[in-house]
Image (spheres, coloured by chain):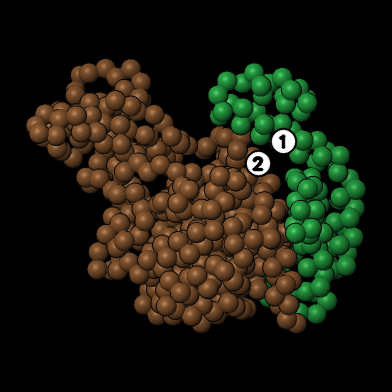
Amino acid sequence: MTADPAPGRETSSPLDAVRDGVERFVSERLGRAVRVERLELLAGGASREAWAVDLALGGGASAGERLELVLRRDLGGVLTLVTLDRPTEFSVISAAYDSGVPVPRPYFEPVAVAGKPAFFMQRVAGEAVGRRVASDPALARARELLPAQLAEALAAIHRVDYRARGLEPRLQHPQPDQSAVAVEIERLYRELDAVDEPHPALELALRRLVCDEPAPQARTTLVHGDFRIGNVLVGEDGLRAVLDWEFAHAGDPYEDLAWFCVRAWRFGNDALEAGGIAARETWLRAYERASGERVDRARVAYMELLGNVKWAIGTLMQARRHLSGVEPSIEFASLGRLCAEMEYEALRLLEARGGSPL
Amino acid sequence: MCGYIEAEVVPAASGRRARFRALIAANVLRIALRELAAGAADDAAEEALFEALGLREGTLGERRRELSRRIRAGECDEGPARDGALAYARESVRRKLAVANPRFIVRVEGA
C-alpha cells in the first residue's frame, strides 16, 4: 500500500508531500476522514527521519479522536552492514511490544509515505538525550529506578521469541552452532579493511579478542544492538520506552549487557560504569534478577572491549562517508577524531586485562 | 577565528541546529590548529618508536601498515614485539588525543 500524493498534483515541499501521504494512507486505512493537525520534523539525517504527527480523526461515534504518533521514514543510505530497513524494524518493535517490552506501540503496518519506506508508532513523552538522562537534577529519582527497569526491559528483549515471529531470516544471525562473537570479529576486520587506514591500536585489541575468544554464546537471543542511555525515553517515573531498534539482530545477549557499560555512553559520569547512572555490579545484578540467568563477568568484560572496538570502527566508517562526500556533514569530521578516544579506551581495557601473552 | 565563531556567529545563528553546527565548526578548527602545531615533533617521535620495533624502511604511513599487518598476523603476540607494538599504539593514540581532545585523558585518568 502506498501513500503518495494524487497523480498530477504538485507538491510544493517535502512537508506537504509527507502531510498528503499521511492523510491519504491513514484515511484509507481507517475508512475515516483524517486531518494532519501537526507535522514536525523531530530528527532528521541524510538516511532517516522521524516526524511528530498529530492526527484528528473525523466521522462516526468517536469524531474528534486524536492520534499522536511518530512517523519513522527511510531516506536511503546505509550506515553499516547491519542496519534494519523500516519494515523489518517495524516487525521487531511489534514483536517486542507484544512481548511486553516497553516500546512505543506500533501502528498499522509498514507503508511508503511520499515514496519512502516508513512506519508509524505511538508518540511517547519523555527525555531521551543522554546527557540529560544522565545528569539532569529533575531526573534524579528516575535514575534510581532506571537500572532495575532497564534490566527488566533488556531481559524481556532477550526473551522475545523472534524465531516464532518469522524474524530470523530477516535479521543478521549466526548459523546454528556458530559463535556470534567470531562472526562479529570477522565483520570488524572487514570494516577496518574497508576504512583502509592503519590502526595499530585497534589491531592489537582485535588480536586480543581473537586470542581470548570465549566459548560460543550459551543462548542466541534477539539483541537490541544499541541499548544504552541516549536510546531510552525517560520520565520522572523512570523508563518509558526503548527506542532506536535499527541495529537489532540475533546474537549474544552479552553484547547488549556490555554495550550499556561502554565508556562513550556514560555522558561524563565516568565513575558510574553502567550508562553513567549506576555501578557496574548494580547493573549486572539487576539483570541477573530480571533474567534469572547468572551473568559471567569475564564475558561482559570481553564484550566491553569488543564493543569499544566496534564503536571505534563505526566512527571511522562514518568519518569516511563524510570524506567521500556521500553524506557531507561537519558532525562526521568530528567523529573521526572520536576514534582516538575509543582507541585510548580499548588500549586501557586491553592493558587492564593483563595476562602475559597477548 | 574560534573566538569569533563562538562570540559572534553562534549567538547570531538562528535555531538550535545552526548553533550546534557553529560550535562544532569552532571545535574542528581548534583541532586543526593543534594538529598544525604538533607537526614535525610528532614525526620524529614516531620514527623513534618504529626504530625500537626494527621498522626502518619506507614512509611513516607504510611502516604503520606494516606494523598493523604484523599485529594481525600474530607476530606481536608476546615478548619485545608485543611491548614495542603496545608502546607505539599507546604513544600514537596519546598524540592523536593531544590534538583531537586534550581534556579526554585528564578526565579518564582522573575518574
Distance in Å between CA atoms under marks 1 and 2: 8 Å
The label number, if any, that marks residue B37 in the structure image: none
Chain given the colour green = B
Residue A71 image position (x, y, % from top left): 33, 38
Chain letter for mark 1: B
**Front residue (pair A301, A34):** A34
Is disc 1 surrounded by few (<14), some (14 to 19) or many (20+) residues within 10 Å? some
Residue at the spot of label 1: B27
Which amino acid is tagged 2? Ser
Q: Hey, which quadrant is residue A303 in on the image?
A: bottom right
Q: In this view, does A12 lie to the left or right of A323?
A: left
The answer to whether mark 1 and mark 2 are in CB contact below 8 A is yes
What is the residue that sits farthest to the left in this orientation? A60
Residue drawn at 33 percent across, 27 percent down: A38
The chain coloured brown in the image: A
> Which disc is residue A334 wearing?
2
- Does residue A342 sit above or below B80 in this rendering? above
Image x and y of residue A201, in percent: 71, 62
